[in-house]
Image (tube, helix red, strand yellow):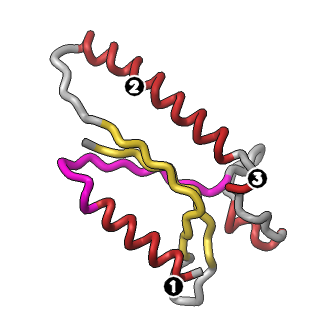
Amino acid sequence: MGQISLEFYQKKKSRWPFSDECIPWEVWTIKVNVVNLANEQERQICREKVGEKLGEKVINIVEVINRHEYLPKMPTQSEVDNVFDTSLKDVQPYLYKITYQITDSLGTSVSTTMRRLIKDTLAL
């Protein structure tokens, strides 16, 4: 069992000596079953199926996230780096992280995620 998470976040400036805090405003998690395949042919077939399914999920996430109610408020010019990745010249996507976890049981990660969600909610 495993999971892949796509997290959109914004930075909250902290006082010195602490680093900036990353506050998620949207998190998408896809749970996956990790399998062992007998040969290369099975791996190739499975890879194509998983690629198609994952592509469908990403398109669904993009369609939902592009709705106005999901987006954070537009920052002022001085706060643009807190919401957008400005390191690219032609586009400025929202700040995001992609993480994955492969475990026998996802119980620990769920409790950790819930603790972080509650902490971040109370911090607002």
Give the magenta-colored segment's residue range: 94-108
Quadrant position of the C terminus in the picture: bottom right
> Of the residues shown, which amino acid type is indicated by label 1?
Phe
Residue at x-position 18% and y-position 48%: 104
**The one of 113 and 99 positioned closer to us in this rendering:** 113
Q: Residues within 10 Å of mark 3 (few under 14, many from 20)?
A: few
At mark 1, the secondary structure is: loop
Determine the CA span between mark 1 and mark 2. 41 Å
Q: Position of residue 33 (x, y in %)?
A: 27, 35
What residue is pinned by disc 1?
18
Residue 99 magenta: yes
Q: Which mark is residue 50?
A: 2
Residue drawn where x is 66% and y is 54% of the image: 94
Give the secondary structure at mark 2: helix
Does 21 sit above or below residue 55? below
Q: Which of the two discs, 1 and 3, sits closer to the camera?
A: 3
Task: Give the label, 3 or 2, closer to the camera.
Answer: 3
Residues 82 and 6: in front is: 6
- Dot 3 amino acid type: His
Residue 14 in percent (x, y) is at 59, 84
Give the residue at mark 3. 68
What amino acid type is highlighted by mark number 2? Val
Q: Earlier in the sequence, mark 1 or mark 2?
A: 1
Residue at 56% across / 89% down in the picture? 16
State which mark lies toward you, 1 or 2: 2
Q: Is residue 16 magenta?
A: no
